[in-house]
């Protein structure tokens, strides 16, 4: 099976609350245009894992992903895969000029990996009409000490992250939400799974713009269509570098009814860009 592939980058979130995905805001910060979401680039890098291992990847897979440089809407890219062993590969997302824009190590957890599954923390749900505090080091220190609000997301055919390509047929059938395709199973893709970490992050602190940089995530169950997902977040670390303010968070995803663990995500982001 050939795991290398080529595609056209797709900005799923041009109207996002995080306006770094809009041309106007991104250009204010020196970018050429709105950034394709990091979670979308992550979906491109994990697609070879879905093709190679199928549902086993959705129930027992992991990925360590780093966004190196921005990628813009409608720009062509290649994903180059190197098999490291039967259960692991490395991948690079490369633009038309040959520049590496994102990189990953992706694989299946070995039987000997006794990784502890996340357990629900029982965090308070996000109140209706909640207006979060502005994202400052002080606000994040308060969240670190006092805890964050939990949020819920619904995986369904009309979701904005249902396709990480403009043409859904470019995705593996196991991920496609297409009633006309009898092989489509509609399990949640990486852009939705990692998107849950982005959305709970933005729900707890008012940030605009902010930049998703890197993640490590482990999957414990395939997320079927019409699943309600409970997300819980813990702030792990805060630091400043070159005038940017960074936060490291850990997010647990659970079935909203049974509380079965679905995924665990560790994410690093710039929540405040230097002006």
Image (cartoon, rainbow, N blue to C red):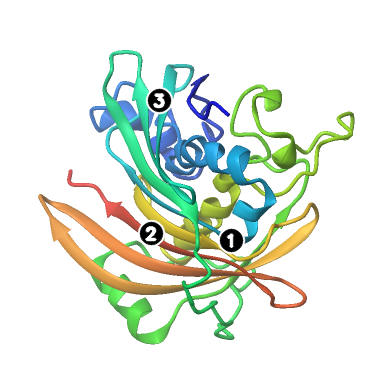
Provide the secondary structure element on which disc 1 rests: helix
Q: Residue furthest left?
A: 242
Q: Quadrant of the C terminus?
A: top left
**Mark whose residue sits in front, 2 or 3:** 2
Q: Depth check: 270 or 44 in front?
A: 44
Q: Residue 23 bears which disc, if any?
A: 3
Which numbered disc flags the more N-terminal residue, 1 or 2? 1
Graded by Cα atoms within 10 Å as few (under 14), some (14 to 19) or many (20 or more), the crowding at tag 3 reads some
Residue at horizontal 57%, vertical 73%? 150
- The Cα atoms of the two marked residues, 1 and 3, are separated by 37 Å
Residue at horizontal 50%, vertical 79%? 116
Give the quarter of the image for residue 38. top left
For the residues bearing labels 1 and 3, Cβ distance under 8 angstroms:
no
In the picture of the structure, the residue carrying the numbered disc 1 is 60
Graded by Cα atoms within 10 Å as few (under 14), some (14 to 19) or many (20 or more), the crowding at tag 1 reads some
Q: Residue 267 bears which disc, if any?
A: 2
Q: How many marks?
A: 3
Which numbered disc flags the more N-terminal residue, 1 or 3? 3
Q: Is residue 38 above or below residue 115?
A: above
Which numbered disc flags the more N-terminal residue, 2 or 3? 3
């Amino acid at each position: 099976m050939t795991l290398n592939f080529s595609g056209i980058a797709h900005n799923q979130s041009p109207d996002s609350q995080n306006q770094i995905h809009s041309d106007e805001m991104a250009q204010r910060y020196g970018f050429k245009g709105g950034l394709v979401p990091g979670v979308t680039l992550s979906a491109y890098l994990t697609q070879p894992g879905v093709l190679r291992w199928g549902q086993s990847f959705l129930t027992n897979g992991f990925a360590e992903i780093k966004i190196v440089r921005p990628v813009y809407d409608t720009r062509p890219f290649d994903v180059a895969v190197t098999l490291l062993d039967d259960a692991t590969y490395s991948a690079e997302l490369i633009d038309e000029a040959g520049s590496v824009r994102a990189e990953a190590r992706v694989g299946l957890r070995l039987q000997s990996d006794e990784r502890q599954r996340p357990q629900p923390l029982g965090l308070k749900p996000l109140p209706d009409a909640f207006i979060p505090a502005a994202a400052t080091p002080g606000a994040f220190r308060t969240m670190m000490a006092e805890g964050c609000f939990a949020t819920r997301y619904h995986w369904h055919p009309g979701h904005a992250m249902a396709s990480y390509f403009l043409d859904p047929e470019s995705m593996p059938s196991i991920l496609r939400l297409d009633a006309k395709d009898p092989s489509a199973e509609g399990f949640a893709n990486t852009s939705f799974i990692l998107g849950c970490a982005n959305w709970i992050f933005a729900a707890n602190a008012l940030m605009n713009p902010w930049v998703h940089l890197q993640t490590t995530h482990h999957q414990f169950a395939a997320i079927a269509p019409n699943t309600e997902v409970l997300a819980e977040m813990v702030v792990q670390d805060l630091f400043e570098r070159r005038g940017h303010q960074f936060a490291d968070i850990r997010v647990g995803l659970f079935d909203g009814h049974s509380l079965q663990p679905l995924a665990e995500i560790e994410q690093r982001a710039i929540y405040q860009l230097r002006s």
